[in-house]
Amino acid sequence: MSGQKRKHNSKPYGDTSPQEKYMQIINQAKQLVRDLLQEALDEKFEYFMDYPKYSRDDQKDNYKNGSIPKTIKTSMGKMQISTPGGCF
């Protein structure tokens, strides 16, 4: 850049409007809450089953049978999580 001046970006958010930036932050927060809820649900189920996820043993007579997607309503809006399937 010999002798050329860089153009100053007069927009404080670049090409993103404040409303778009706000929505990005809200969506990231929703994702964080969804991940936290999913992790808590998975840990609770693992505690209930009394063995780690994907564990196989001839001594056990019950196994997790997949998962079922569920939509829950929160103060941040609707979120989809996976709930444990039946145990057999």
Image (cartoon, rainbow, N blue to C red):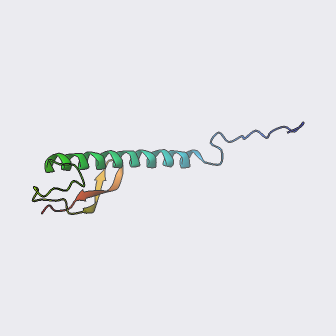
Q: Where is residue 14 in the image (x, y as percent from the top left)?
A: 65, 44
Quarter of the figure with the C terminus:
bottom left
**Would residue 70 be found to the left or right of residue 63 on screen?**
right
Task: Give the image quarter of residue 84.
Answer: bottom left
Q: Residue at x 89, y 37 (%)?
A: 2
Quarter of the figure with the N terminus:
top right
Q: 47 or 69: which is nearer to us?
A: 47
**Would residue 33 be found to the left or right of residue 87 on screen?**
right
**Would residue 10 be found to the left or right of residue 65 on screen?**
right
**Would residue 28 be found to the left or right of residue 66 on screen?**
right
Task: Give the image quarter of residue 60.
Answer: bottom left
Task: Give the image quarter of residue 33.
Answer: top left
Q: Where is residue 19 in the image (x, y as percent from the top left)?
A: 54, 47
Q: 16 or 61: which is nearer to us?
A: 61
Q: Which residue is drawn at 65% across and 48% down?
A: 15
**Most extreme residue toward the right, as rendered?**
3
Q: Position of residue 52 (x, y in %)?
A: 22, 49
- The total number of labels drawn is 0
**Most extreme residue toward the front, as rendered?**
58
Q: Which residue is drawn at 24% across and 55% down?
A: 54
| Figure check: 73 above or below 21 | below
Q: Position of residue 57 (x, y in %)?
A: 16, 56
